[in-house]
Structures are given as structure tokens and as C-alpha cells.
Image (cartoon, rainbow, N blue to C red):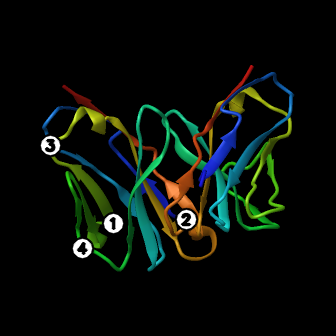
Amino acid sequence: AQKVTQAQTEISVVEKEDVTLDCVYETRDTTYYLFWYKQPPSGELVFLIRRNSFDEQNEISGRYSWNFQKSTSSFNFTITASQVVDSAVYFCALSGLRGANSKLTFGKGITLSVRP
Amino acid sequence: NAGVTQTPKFQVLKTGQSMTLQCAQDMNHEYMSWYRQDPGMGLRLIHYSVGAGITDQGEVPNGYNVSRSTTEDFPLRLLSAAPSQTSVYFCASSRDPQWEQYFGPGTRLTVT
């Protein structure tokens, strides 16, 4: 069975600090997909990124960056120069390609608080 | 284009009552799913559907029923509500599980 572990449960930083959210996954599939979602205090779930297992290039989008390392089964998310609006719960998720693993499995989430 | 809609937004039930949470999408997505979110537990898959007429169980299916008679609608039925079903429920749709999920706004259910 596949699994996503977000070992950090709560992180608190001061505005403008950089922060990294860790995600470690387990799967026996060779083809799989990794995701990050954001859930702000308003409650909706917002898609941030999708990455397939064959693309290990790091991704940068503004202040957000993602580091995918197959060797350590990690897909970490870094926010540079954090802002109060980044305060949210962040979920990492994994989907395989076939059978029981083709469902989307979420980690338990990391609550990020950014203080002014 | 409304995306994924869920009704109601809030609901209070008494133990033993039944109800249906509605979910509809207008993006012609084949894949739809229901999750529940509980503090410290993340999002857990209840049931999912890969197309009209096809449904399957997720991680926590007990006490819930689903059906998928059309591509657009995927209702979730609570057969006999229990306090353990107090949660926030999210419906999602996508092309398939390997693509971005579009989530509804959620239904906050309290069972007393």
C-alpha cells in the first residue's frame, strides 16, 4: 500500500523567514504522481503542484519551490520570504497508476502559521 | 462554470438519522470522490467513482453509500448517522486520480 508521511504537524515562523515543509512517500509503483494542496483558514482546498515520478526537476513558482528526490522518496515544499497569507494547512498527496494504488492518498497535513 | 458544488454547507443530525450529501460537477470529469477531514487525520477517502455506474470503496467506507447514475452527480448517503461521522466532507472531481483534483467547498456535519 502507498503512504504519505508529513512528520511536521505544526510550524510557526515569523514573516519573511523561509520555511520548508517535508513530505516523504512510500510506493512500489514505478510510475506515480505527487501533489501539494493548500487549505487556508477559509477551508477550501487549493491545488498547488503536480509532479510525475519521471520528472525530478525542481520547480519554482514565485516564492514557492519544490524539491523532488526519488533517492530519498521525498517531495519537499519551500516557501521563501513567507507572508501571513501563507498561513494554512498544507497537504502532500500521492497517486499511483494502477489498481489499489491508483487512488489519491493524502498525508495528515502541516499547519503553517506565519506571524507578522 | 460552477466547478464542484456541494450541498448543504452545514448540517446537524441526530444519531440514527439518515441523509444525503449532494455533489455535482460541470466539468465532465469521469473521476469523482468523497473525503472526510478530521483533525490530525488529513483527508481520508470514503468512496470513489471512475465513471457513471461504477463506484468503489476507499479507506473508510463503513456507514456510507454512494451511487453514480450520471457523470455530473455523486451523492453520499449516511445510512444511520453516528457521532463518529461528525466531520467535514469534501467532494472532488478530476479526469482521473493522477490529475489535479477539483474540490467542492465542503459540508460540515455534526451528529449529536
Q: Name the subunit of mark 3.
A: A
Q: Name the subunit of mark 1.
A: A
Instruction: Name the N-terminal-most of marks 4 and 3.
Output: 4
Q: Position of residue A7 (x, y in %)?
A: 35, 45
Q: Report the residue at 50% width, 41% height from top.
A: A44
Q: Secondary structure at mark 2?
A: loop
Mark-to-mark CA distance, 1 and 3: 26 Å
Q: Secondary structure at mark 4?
A: loop
Instruction: Identify the residue position indicated by label 4 in the image.
Output: A57
> Which corner quadrant holds the N terminus of chain A?
bottom right
Instruction: Name the N-terminal-most of marks 2 and 4.
Output: 2
Q: Report the residue at 20% width, 51% height from top.
A: A63
Do callouts 4 and 3 point to residues on the same chain? yes
Give the answer, above or below, for where B39 lies relative to B14: below
Using the rendered image of the protein, determine whether residue B18 is visible from the camera's viewpoint.
yes
The three-letter amino acid code for the residue at tag 4 is Gln
Do callouts 1 and 4 point to residues on the same chain? yes
Q: Report the residue at 65% width, 46% height from top.
A: B5
